[in-house]
Amino acid sequence: MLIRSGDMVEVKTGNAKGTRAKVLSVRRADGKIVVEGVNLVYRHMRRSQKNPQGGRLSKEMPIDASNVLVVCASCDKGARLGVKVLADGGRVRACKKCGADNGKIRAAKAAK
């Protein structure tokens, strides 16, 4: 999965279709991500010392990573990402539409 926390993504399915928001966390084992303001649920909390107000607290729940597209900075559209190998052996995430770099995956390996 090439999505990282902090990436700007566009939701392509569900109630929040078309929403652009930031990725808060990535759960690689499940293939799910938590996106800011998407898939909100209510947690009903009883009054306590920790939470004196009580009531309904909203929080984001994970959605499947296949339901979002990473927004490319150069073409400003939701696009899939691929891996581009550089001449020095390093790897970068690349936009499939315009080919622009979207962050480093691995630095170049040292020569032996």
Image (cartoon, grey):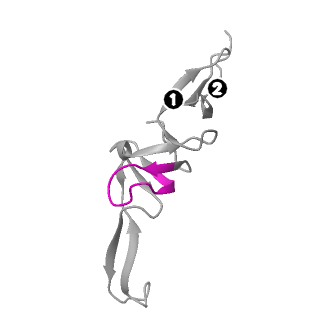
Kind of element beneath mark 1: loop
> Does the magenta segment cover residue 28?
no
* x and y percentages locating residue 70 in the rendered image: 50, 43
Count of numbered labels shown in the rendering: 2
Badge 2 is on which residue?
Answer: 107
Q: Residue at x 56, y 22 (%)?
A: 84
Secondary structure of residue under mark 2: loop
**Residue 23: which numbered mark, if any?**
none
- Residue stretch rendered in magenta on the structure: 9-25
4 vs 56: above or below: above
Residue in front for this viewpoint, 74 or 4 = 74
Residue in the picture at 51% in, 56% down: 21
Q: Is residue 19 magenta?
A: yes
The amino acid beneath tag 2 is Ala
* Above-or-below relation of 106 to 21: above
Q: Residues within 10 Å of mark 1 (few under 14, many from 20)?
A: some
Q: Is residue 82 above or below residue 16?
A: above
Give percent across and percent down for residue 85.
58, 19
Q: Position of residue 63 (x, y in %)?
A: 35, 53
For the residues marked 1 and 2, what is the alpha-carbon distance in whole angstroms? 21 Å
Q: Is residue 35 left or right of residue 71?
A: left
Q: Residue at x 59, y 27 (%)?
A: 99
* Left or right: residue 91 compared with residue 59: right
Q: Earlier in the sequence, mark 1 or mark 2?
A: 1
Q: Which residue is mark 1?
A: 96
User: Measured from the top left, where is residue 27 in percent x and y?
Assistant: 40, 47
